[in-house]
Amino acid sequence: MGREAARRFASRGETVALFDVNAQGMAETRGNLAGIHCWTVDMTDFAAVCAAVQDVEHKLGPIAGLYNCAAIMPFGKLLEQDNAIIHKQMAINYGGLVNITQAVLPGMLARGHGDFVSFASMAGIIPMLMTGGYTATKFAVTAFTETLYHEHLNSGIRFACVCPPAVATPLLQQGKDTAWPKMLDEAGPPIAPGTVIDAIEDCLDKGRFFVFPTRNAKIGAIMRRLFPGLIWKQVHQVEGF
Ligand SMILES: NC(=O)c1ccc[n+]([C@@H]2O[C@H](COP(=O)([O-])OP(=O)(O)OC[C@H]3O[C@@H](n4cnc5c(N)ncnc54)[C@H](O)[C@@H]3O)[C@@H](O)[C@H]2O)c1
Protein backbone atom coordinates (compact mmCIF):
# COMPACT_ATOMS: atom_id res chain seq x y z
CA MET A 1 0.00 0.00 0.00
CA GLY A 2 2.99 2.26 0.64
CA ARG A 3 4.08 1.56 -2.94
CA GLU A 4 0.63 2.44 -4.29
CA ALA A 5 0.58 5.73 -2.34
CA ALA A 6 4.17 6.64 -3.28
CA ARG A 7 3.67 6.06 -7.00
CA ARG A 8 0.37 7.93 -6.96
CA PHE A 9 1.91 10.99 -5.26
CA ALA A 10 5.00 10.96 -7.48
CA SER A 11 2.82 10.70 -10.62
CA ARG A 12 1.12 13.90 -9.48
CA GLY A 13 4.50 15.63 -9.33
CA GLU A 14 5.02 15.39 -5.57
CA THR A 15 8.36 14.46 -4.01
CA VAL A 16 8.31 11.19 -2.05
CA ALA A 17 10.81 9.73 0.44
CA LEU A 18 10.57 5.97 1.04
CA PHE A 19 11.89 4.28 4.20
CA ASP A 20 12.12 0.48 4.07
CA VAL A 21 14.51 -2.33 4.93
CA ASN A 22 13.97 -3.72 1.43
CA ALA A 23 16.20 -1.69 -0.94
CA GLN A 24 15.24 -3.76 -3.99
CA GLY A 25 11.54 -3.33 -3.24
CA MET A 26 12.02 0.42 -3.00
CA ALA A 27 13.89 0.48 -6.33
CA GLU A 28 10.92 -1.36 -7.93
CA THR A 29 8.54 1.16 -6.38
CA ARG A 30 10.61 4.05 -7.72
CA GLY A 31 10.81 2.58 -11.25
CA ASN A 32 11.11 5.52 -13.61
CA LEU A 33 9.51 8.06 -11.26
CA ALA A 34 12.19 10.67 -10.58
CA GLY A 35 10.23 12.15 -7.66
CA ILE A 36 10.73 9.02 -5.50
CA HIS A 37 13.82 8.88 -3.25
CA CYS A 38 14.82 5.91 -1.11
CA TRP A 39 16.37 5.47 2.34
CA THR A 40 17.20 2.00 3.62
CA VAL A 41 16.01 2.25 7.23
CA ASP A 42 14.91 -0.25 9.86
CA MET A 43 11.89 1.39 11.50
CA THR A 44 12.70 -0.25 14.85
CA ASP A 45 15.96 1.75 15.10
CA PHE A 46 14.96 5.15 16.52
CA ALA A 47 18.39 6.77 15.99
CA ALA A 48 18.44 5.60 12.35
CA VAL A 49 14.87 6.83 11.76
CA CYS A 50 15.69 10.27 13.23
CA ALA A 51 18.89 10.53 11.15
CA ALA A 52 17.01 9.58 7.96
CA VAL A 53 14.22 12.10 8.67
CA GLN A 54 16.83 14.84 9.15
CA ASP A 55 18.50 13.82 5.89
CA VAL A 56 15.15 13.90 4.04
CA GLU A 57 14.31 17.37 5.35
CA HIS A 58 17.82 18.60 4.51
CA LYS A 59 17.75 17.23 0.94
CA LEU A 60 14.05 17.41 0.00
CA GLY A 61 12.50 19.98 2.37
CA PRO A 62 9.90 19.79 5.16
CA ILE A 63 7.72 16.66 5.32
CA ALA A 64 4.11 17.49 4.44
CA GLY A 65 2.62 14.01 4.71
CA LEU A 66 3.49 10.75 6.44
CA TYR A 67 2.16 7.27 5.58
CA ASN A 68 3.33 4.75 8.17
CA CYS A 69 2.97 1.38 6.40
CA ALA A 70 5.84 -0.82 7.62
CA ALA A 71 4.66 -4.10 9.13
CA ILE A 72 5.10 -7.85 9.26
CA MET A 73 2.26 -10.35 9.72
CA PRO A 74 3.21 -13.80 10.99
CA PHE A 75 0.16 -15.69 12.31
CA GLY A 76 -0.21 -18.61 14.71
CA LYS A 77 -1.76 -19.61 18.01
CA LEU A 78 -0.22 -17.53 20.77
CA LEU A 79 1.43 -20.41 22.63
CA GLU A 80 2.75 -21.90 19.40
CA GLN A 81 4.28 -18.71 17.99
CA ASP A 82 7.97 -18.16 18.59
CA ASN A 83 8.49 -15.74 21.49
CA ALA A 84 10.94 -13.62 19.48
CA ILE A 85 8.47 -13.30 16.55
CA ILE A 86 5.71 -11.99 18.81
CA HIS A 87 8.09 -9.35 20.18
CA LYS A 88 9.52 -8.57 16.73
CA GLN A 89 6.13 -7.78 15.21
CA MET A 90 5.35 -5.42 18.09
CA ALA A 91 8.73 -3.71 17.57
CA ILE A 92 8.05 -3.15 13.85
CA ASN A 93 4.29 -2.65 13.62
CA TYR A 94 3.90 -0.57 16.78
CA GLY A 95 7.49 0.48 17.65
CA GLY A 96 8.04 1.74 14.09
CA LEU A 97 4.99 3.98 14.45
CA VAL A 98 6.27 5.36 17.76
CA ASN A 99 9.67 6.07 16.18
CA ILE A 100 8.43 7.79 13.02
CA THR A 101 5.90 9.80 15.04
CA GLN A 102 8.52 11.24 17.37
CA ALA A 103 10.85 11.89 14.43
CA VAL A 104 8.34 13.59 12.08
CA LEU A 105 5.36 14.97 13.99
CA PRO A 106 7.17 17.74 15.97
CA GLY A 107 8.22 19.38 12.67
CA MET A 108 4.68 19.17 11.27
CA LEU A 109 3.28 20.69 14.48
CA ALA A 110 5.79 23.54 14.36
CA ARG A 111 4.72 24.27 10.77
CA GLY A 112 1.03 23.92 11.68
CA HIS A 113 0.09 21.57 8.85
CA GLY A 114 0.59 18.05 7.53
CA ASP A 115 -1.11 14.70 6.93
CA PHE A 116 -0.39 11.93 9.43
CA VAL A 117 -1.60 8.54 8.19
CA SER A 118 -1.21 5.53 10.41
CA PHE A 119 -1.92 2.00 9.13
CA ALA A 120 -3.83 -0.04 11.68
CA SER A 121 -6.17 -2.75 10.33
CA MET A 122 -9.54 -4.36 10.91
CA ALA A 123 -7.27 -6.59 13.03
CA GLY A 124 -6.92 -3.49 15.24
CA ILE A 125 -10.69 -3.52 15.76
CA ILE A 126 -11.68 -7.22 15.81
CA PRO A 127 -9.53 -9.90 17.48
CA MET A 128 -9.68 -13.43 16.03
CA LEU A 129 -8.19 -16.85 16.61
CA MET A 130 -4.60 -17.42 15.36
CA THR A 131 -3.89 -13.73 14.72
CA GLY A 132 -3.36 -12.65 18.36
CA GLY A 133 0.26 -11.48 18.09
CA TYR A 134 -0.45 -9.36 15.00
CA THR A 135 -3.80 -8.17 16.34
CA ALA A 136 -2.13 -6.95 19.54
CA THR A 137 0.21 -4.77 17.46
CA LYS A 138 -2.73 -3.29 15.57
CA PHE A 139 -4.74 -2.59 18.74
CA ALA A 140 -1.61 -0.76 19.95
CA VAL A 141 -1.44 1.21 16.68
CA THR A 142 -5.12 2.16 16.93
CA ALA A 143 -4.85 3.28 20.57
CA PHE A 144 -1.62 5.21 19.98
CA THR A 145 -2.95 6.97 16.88
CA GLU A 146 -6.32 7.81 18.44
CA THR A 147 -4.62 9.32 21.50
CA LEU A 148 -2.15 11.20 19.31
CA TYR A 149 -5.05 12.66 17.34
CA HIS A 150 -6.85 13.81 20.47
CA GLU A 151 -3.65 15.28 21.93
CA HIS A 152 -3.33 17.43 18.81
CA LEU A 153 -6.86 18.53 17.95
CA ASN A 154 -6.89 21.89 16.15
CA SER A 155 -3.15 21.63 15.46
CA GLY A 156 -3.59 21.93 11.70
CA ILE A 157 -2.53 18.29 11.23
CA ARG A 158 -4.98 15.93 9.49
CA PHE A 159 -4.80 12.53 11.20
CA ALA A 160 -6.08 9.24 9.79
CA CYS A 161 -6.14 5.75 11.29
CA VAL A 162 -6.55 3.25 8.45
CA CYS A 163 -8.44 0.00 9.13
CA PRO A 164 -8.55 -2.11 5.97
CA PRO A 165 -9.84 -5.67 5.69
CA ALA A 166 -7.52 -8.07 3.78
CA VAL A 167 -5.75 -6.26 0.93
CA ALA A 168 -4.02 -7.94 -2.03
CA THR A 169 -0.37 -7.22 -1.11
CA PRO A 170 2.70 -9.41 -0.37
CA LEU A 171 1.90 -9.16 3.35
CA LEU A 172 -0.88 -11.75 3.04
CA GLN A 173 1.65 -14.41 2.03
CA GLN A 174 3.34 -14.06 5.44
CA GLY A 175 0.04 -15.04 7.06
CA LYS A 176 -0.48 -17.90 4.59
CA ASP A 177 3.07 -19.19 5.20
CA THR A 178 2.44 -19.43 8.96
CA ALA A 179 -1.23 -20.04 9.85
CA TRP A 180 -4.33 -18.94 8.00
CA PRO A 181 -7.62 -18.38 9.84
CA LYS A 182 -10.63 -19.57 7.82
CA MET A 183 -12.40 -16.36 8.91
CA LEU A 184 -10.18 -14.37 6.54
CA ASP A 185 -11.56 -16.34 3.58
CA GLU A 186 -15.14 -15.91 4.86
CA ALA A 187 -14.72 -12.15 4.51
CA GLY A 188 -14.42 -12.39 0.70
CA PRO A 189 -11.50 -11.72 -1.65
CA PRO A 190 -8.82 -9.17 -0.65
CA ILE A 191 -9.46 -5.64 -1.88
CA ALA A 192 -7.09 -3.68 -4.13
CA PRO A 193 -4.44 -1.40 -2.53
CA GLY A 194 -5.77 1.52 -4.59
CA THR A 195 -9.18 1.22 -2.90
CA VAL A 196 -7.48 1.84 0.45
CA ILE A 197 -5.48 4.84 -0.77
CA ASP A 198 -8.68 6.32 -2.32
CA ALA A 199 -10.48 5.89 1.02
CA ILE A 200 -7.62 7.58 2.91
CA GLU A 201 -7.66 10.61 0.62
CA ASP A 202 -11.45 10.84 0.89
CA CYS A 203 -11.39 10.65 4.71
CA LEU A 204 -8.56 13.21 5.01
CA ASP A 205 -10.58 15.61 2.85
CA LYS A 206 -13.73 15.03 4.92
CA GLY A 207 -11.93 15.25 8.28
CA ARG A 208 -12.76 11.63 9.20
CA PHE A 209 -10.22 10.02 11.53
CA PHE A 210 -11.03 6.31 11.10
CA VAL A 211 -10.70 5.03 7.54
CA PHE A 212 -12.86 1.96 6.84
CA PRO A 213 -12.34 1.34 3.11
CA THR A 214 -15.36 -0.95 2.62
CA ARG A 215 -18.96 -1.07 3.82
CA ASN A 216 -18.32 -4.44 5.46
CA ALA A 217 -15.39 -2.98 7.41
CA LYS A 218 -17.68 -0.24 8.75
CA ILE A 219 -20.31 -2.80 9.71
CA GLY A 220 -17.63 -5.00 11.33
CA ALA A 221 -16.48 -2.10 13.53
CA ILE A 222 -20.06 -1.44 14.66
CA MET A 223 -20.67 -5.16 15.31
CA ARG A 224 -17.50 -5.41 17.39
CA ARG A 225 -18.62 -2.45 19.53
CA LEU A 226 -22.19 -3.68 20.03
CA PHE A 227 -21.99 -7.48 19.82
CA PRO A 228 -18.44 -8.76 20.49
CA GLY A 229 -19.80 -12.09 21.79
CA LEU A 230 -21.65 -12.69 18.53
CA ILE A 231 -18.46 -12.21 16.51
CA TRP A 232 -16.53 -14.59 18.79
CA LYS A 233 -19.30 -17.19 18.40
CA GLN A 234 -18.97 -17.00 14.62
CA VAL A 235 -15.16 -17.12 14.81
CA HIS A 236 -15.25 -20.34 16.90
CA GLN A 237 -17.83 -21.88 14.57
CA VAL A 238 -15.83 -21.11 11.43
CA GLU A 239 -12.42 -22.14 12.83
CA GLY A 240 -13.90 -25.26 14.44
CA PHE A 241 -12.34 -24.83 17.91
N1 LIG B 1 -2.38 -6.43 3.34
C1 LIG B 1 -3.38 -6.50 4.20
O1 LIG B 1 -4.24 -7.39 4.11
C2 LIG B 1 -3.51 -5.46 5.28
C3 LIG B 1 -4.76 -5.32 5.88
C4 LIG B 1 -4.91 -4.37 6.89
C5 LIG B 1 -3.85 -3.59 7.27
N2 LIG B 1 -2.63 -3.77 6.67
C6 LIG B 1 -1.53 -2.91 7.12
O2 LIG B 1 -1.22 -1.99 6.09
C7 LIG B 1 0.17 -1.65 6.14
C8 LIG B 1 0.82 -1.89 4.80
O3 LIG B 1 0.77 -3.29 4.55
P1 LIG B 1 0.98 -3.95 3.11
O4 LIG B 1 -0.10 -4.94 2.99
O5 LIG B 1 1.18 -2.91 2.09
O6 LIG B 1 2.32 -4.76 3.40
P2 LIG B 1 3.64 -5.05 2.52
O7 LIG B 1 4.25 -6.28 3.08
O8 LIG B 1 3.33 -4.99 1.08
O9 LIG B 1 4.53 -3.78 2.90
C9 LIG B 1 5.10 -3.64 4.17
C10 LIG B 1 6.48 -3.06 3.99
O10 LIG B 1 7.08 -2.91 5.30
C11 LIG B 1 8.46 -3.15 5.14
N3 LIG B 1 9.08 -3.45 6.42
C12 LIG B 1 8.95 -4.57 7.18
N4 LIG B 1 9.70 -4.47 8.28
C13 LIG B 1 10.32 -3.27 8.24
C14 LIG B 1 11.21 -2.58 9.10
N5 LIG B 1 11.67 -3.13 10.23
N6 LIG B 1 11.65 -1.35 8.74
C15 LIG B 1 11.25 -0.80 7.57
N7 LIG B 1 10.39 -1.39 6.72
C16 LIG B 1 9.94 -2.61 7.05
C17 LIG B 1 8.53 -4.32 4.17
O11 LIG B 1 9.82 -4.45 3.59
C18 LIG B 1 7.43 -3.95 3.17
O12 LIG B 1 7.96 -3.22 2.08
C19 LIG B 1 0.75 -2.51 7.27
O13 LIG B 1 0.78 -1.74 8.46
C20 LIG B 1 -0.24 -3.63 7.42
O14 LIG B 1 -0.21 -4.19 8.72
C21 LIG B 1 -2.45 -4.67 5.67
Image (cartoon, helix red, strand yellow):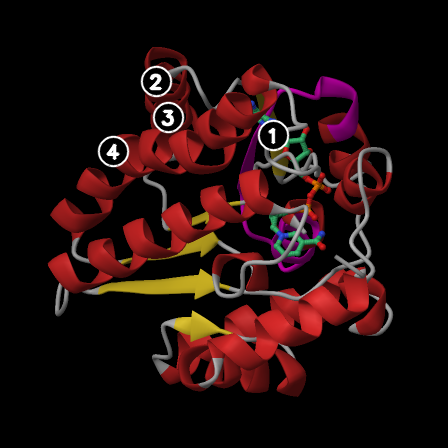
Q: Is residue 52 visible?
A: yes
As shown in the figure, which amino acid type bears the numbered disc 4?
Answer: Gln
Residue 22 on the magenta segment: yes
Mark 3 secondary-structure assignment: helix
Badge 2 density bin: few <14, some 14–19, many ≥20, Cα 10 Å: some
- The magenta region covers 5-25
User: In the image, residue 88 lies at what x, y percent?
Assistant: 53, 22
Q: Earlier in the sequence, mark 3 or mark 1?
A: 3
Residue 184 on the magenta segment: no
Mark 2 secondary-structure assignment: helix
Image quarter where the C terminus lies is: bottom right
* Residue located at (80% from left, 34% from top): 178
Q: Is residue 152 visible?
A: no
Q: Earlier in the sequence, mark 4 or mark 2?
A: 2
Location of residue 130 with respect to 89 vertically, above or below: below
Q: CA distance from mark 1 to mark 2?
A: 30 Å
As shown in the figure, which amino acid type bears the numbered disc 3?
Answer: Val
Q: CA distance from mark 4 to mark 2?
A: 9 Å
* Residue located at (32% from left, 22% from top): 54
- Quarter of the displayed picture in which ligand 1 can be seen: top right
Q: Earlier in the sequence, mark 1 or mark 2?
A: 2
User: What residue would you read off at disc 3?
Assistant: 53
User: What residue would you read off at disc 2?
Assistant: 46
User: What residue would you read off at disc 4?
Assistant: 102
Q: Earlier in the sequence, mark 4 or mark 3?
A: 3
Q: CA distance from mark 4 to mark 3?
A: 10 Å
Q: CA distance from mark 2 to mark 3?
A: 11 Å
* Residue located at (25% from left, 33% from top): 102
> Which marked residue is nearer to the observer: mark 3 or mark 1?
1
In this view of the protein, which residue sits in the foreground, 29 or 131? 131
